[in-house]
Image (cartoon, coloured by chain):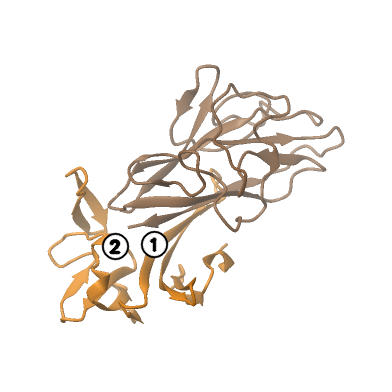
Chain colours: A brown, B orange
Amino acid sequence: MAATVEIDEANGVGETLTHNITNTNMGSTDAVNLDPVANPLTPGNNTFEKWQKIHVTAMGGSSKIDNLKIWRTSALGGSAVHKTNARTSSYAQATYATPIASASSVATQTMPTSAPASANLGISGSLGGSLLAAGSSDYLVHQIQSNAGDTAGSTSTMNYQYDETA
Amino acid sequence: MQNYIFQRPETGQVENVIKERWCWEAHYIDGSLLKQFDDNGIFHQFREIDQSKLLSFKMVNPESLPAFTLIFNPKTMKLIHFYRNIVLNVGTSEEKKIKIYCFGFEKKFFGRTQKSLMAIMPNDELITTDNLDNLEVS
C-alpha cells in the first residue's frame, strides 16, 4: 500500500492524544469525537478549539509526504466564522495549549473554502517541510466563532490533501 | 491485491507495498527497463530511476488500458512523479478518498523553470496542465 494517514486530536491540559479520530465534530466541550447534540454550540459562543495533526503511521514504500492543504466546505450558519492557524504565508508552528472556548489567539485566519493554491499546514514549522518517515504534521488549530443571531444546526465539513512521492 | 516487497535503504526495514492502479516503467536508452512493481515482486522507489539514461517514462495500468508515455530528454528535463491524495468530507458518512497519479517534467527555459504535468484522474482521464492546483475533484 501507499502511505497510511490518519487524523489525531489532542485534548485537555495534558495533551491527551487520540489517534485516528472518527469525526471532527465541534461543540461546547473539549472532547474528541464529540456528540454535537449533547454538546451544542449556543449562538454567540465559540466552539472549543480543535488541535489536530495529520499523522503518517506508515510510509508504505513511499519516500516523502509534503504539500499539506486543509479547507472546509458547506455553509456555516448565519455569520459564524471558522478560524484556523492554517495559512499559506506568515506561517508559524503552533505549540500545544489547552483548548479554549474564548476567541482563539492561535486560530486567527479564516479557514479557506476551497483547496488553497499552496500548502497551508506545515511540517516541522515549515510550509515547505516534508515527512521522510512516519511522523506528524504541525498542529492544525481551528475554531468556529458564532454570533447571537446565527442559525443553529449548520453543518460544514473538513477536507485535506497531501502529495506523496513513492 | 498483490503485495510487493520494499527494503528501505535508510533503515533496512522491509515494507509491503500493494500494487497501484497506475504504475510507472522507466525505459532506458540501452534497452533495459525498471518497473515500479517489478516481475520479481520487488517495489522500486521513484528515486531509483537513473534519469541520465532515461529514454521514456510510461504510466501503465495492470488492467491493460493504453499506457501514457513521456518521451524523455535527459539533457533538458527533470522527471516528476507523485500521488496527489485528497480526502473530502473527513469523518462523515460521505468521506471520499481520491488518488491522482501525477507525472511530467520540468525544464529550464531562459533561466526560468517550466513544468509540464499530467494527471491521471480516478476515471482514468488524462489531464495536462502546468499547475495541478487547477484540477477540480468532487
Residue A16 spot, x, y in % from top left: 48, 22
Contact (CB < 8 A) between labels 2 and 1? yes
Asked if one can make out residue A92 in the rendered structure from this viewpoint, the answer is yes
Residue B92 spot, x, y in % from top left: 56, 45
Residue at the far top: name it: A13
Quadrant of the drawing holding the C terminus of chain A: bottom left
Q: Tell me the kind of residue under disc 1.
A: Phe
The residue located at (64%, 56%) in the rendering is A114
What is the C-alpha distance between the residues marked 2 and 1?
9 Å
Q: Which mark is residue B46?
A: 2
Residue at the far right: name it: A149
What secondary structure is marked by label 2? helix
In-front residue for pair B63/A118: A118
A27, above or below A98, in the image: below
Callout 2 crowding tier (Cα within 10 Å): few <14, some 14–19, many ≥20: many
The residue indicated by pointer 1 is B82
Asked if one can make out residue B95 in the rendered structure from this viewpoint, the answer is no
Residue A48 appears left or right of B118: right
The residue located at (29%, 70%) in the rendering is B24
Q: Earlier in the sequence, mark 2 or mark 1?
A: 2
In-front residue for pair A126/A60: A126
The chain under label 2 reads B
The residue located at (43%, 32%) in the rendering is A19
In-front residue for pair A117/A112: A117
What secondary structure is marked by label 1? strand
A95, above or below B71, in the image: above
The chain under label 1 reads B
Residue A79 spot, x, y in % from top left: 82, 42
Residue B38 spot, x, y in % from top left: 18, 66
